[in-house]
Image (cartoon, helix red, strand yellow):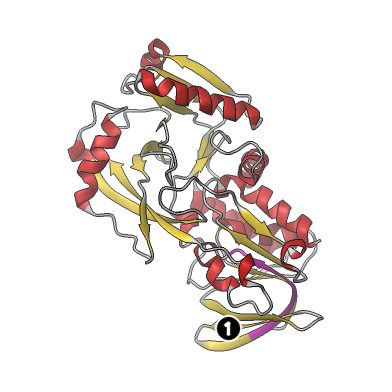
Amino acid sequence: MGSYDCLVIGAGVIGLACASRLARSGHSVLVVEEERWIGSHTSSRNSEVIHAGIYYSPTSLKARLCMEGRHLLYRWCEDHHVEHRRIGKLLVAVSPDEIAALEALQKNAVQSGVDSLLEVSAAQLRQMEPAVAGVAALLSVDTGIIDSHAYLQSLLGDAQRHGADLVLATRVSRLQHNGAYWLVEGESCGEPFSVGVHRVINAAGLFSSQLASNIDGLEARHVPQTQWCRGRYFSYSGRSPFSRLVYPMPDVNTAGLGVHATLDMGGQVKFGPDVAWTDTLDYQVEEVLRSDFAIAIQRYFPGLDPQRLTPGYCGIRPKLSGPGQPAEDFLIQGPKTHGLPGLVNLYGIESPGLTASLAIADHVARIID
């Protein structure tokens, strides 16, 4: 495969955003992806939401990169003709005992720099979304939706226009630094390969920790355990009862934001994701889950017709926290952390990873340049 300045391992939104950013900076870039298509795991199996930055600790990478990334992503969508809509989101307290949680989210958002939340009374909520039940809400006007598949293609197209190469069906099995460059070995389309590069970006998502364990010289203490968390979605047939996204209050110390309602670019409503821990790549959505979903949804959408719920799709989130634990921050390690030159490992890039992707790419570029 010759030699390159930069090797990006993983062709999801993070890997492709990094490839685009580095290629535009003049680096020769090779992207390798184990699957036969780009974005085949977390990047194409999510809620497709552009987040405002409400939920994350104000001092976290998630908060900062989400805020930076949101602005960059909206601009990217305009410049690259990626379909998106700044549709807005309602965060709903369905009962008086949830108002404190709603106020805490508002305070956290303000501390994180989100200045576009609007308070919504019960009467205003009924007028805005008659199908939604709640005693109070917050309207996030900067929340949007995006065609994630079109976004992936736009990132790839931009990277390739600036000289980056993509090789699919390619698995990296070993990386070692010889003092001058990284020697990367693996298998591509059933044949062994090796490539020499000066910089390596481990953007393997679900498999980042597994890949890192195959990096010679990387101490085990720098390789966190990645937990896999399934998130299943149900589609809702017929006309949408909502014109905006609708989110309940998140449960404390859980892996998700609750079973919320989102819309795709065609106006189709979907509900999800739920939380189910796993150690296998299982993307099935079981019909038997309908009743559990209906119970969760009817708290804020009492008019739900459970028979209109049909199994949709499933995603798996790479998490650095386990069941019953609070969410961990993104973990992005460069040479100053692990001591290996030209190496950046990205762990736990879950939501708001899509929103933050362009800001993450800038962050990675600053680390290695």
Residue range highlighted in magenta: 194-203
State the residue at coordinates (67%, 73%).
218
Asked if one can make out residue 329 in the rendered structure from this viewpoint, the answer is yes
Q: Residue 307's spot in the image, x, y percent?
A: 17, 39
Q: Residue 177's spot in the image, x, y percent?
A: 74, 80
- Is 44 above or below relative to 339? above
Q: Which amino acid does the dot numbered 1 rest on?
A: Gly
Q: Quadrant of residue 195?
A: bottom right
State the residue at coordinates (42%, 41%).
264
Q: Residue 137's spot in the image, x, y percent?
A: 44, 21
* Residue occupied by mark 1: 186
Element under label 1? Answer: strand
Q: Quadrant of the N terminus?
A: bottom right
- Is 69 above or below relative to 159? above
User: Is 195 contained in the magenta span?
Assistant: yes
Decide if residue 156 is on the left or right side of residue 22. Answer: left
- Magenta stretch, main secondary structure, is strand
State the residue at coordinates (66%, 72%).
219
State the residue at coordinates (71%, 57%).
364
Q: 251 and 208: which one is in front?
A: 251
User: Is 142 contained in the magenta span?
Assistant: no
Decide if residue 45 is on the left or right side of residue 288. Answer: right
Q: Residues within 10 Å of mark 1 (few under 14, many from 20)?
A: some
Decide if residue 264 is on the left or right side of residue 210. Answer: left
- Is 48 above or below relative to 238? below
Asked if one can make out residue 140 in the rendered structure from this viewpoint, the answer is no
Q: Quadrant of the C terminus?
A: bottom right
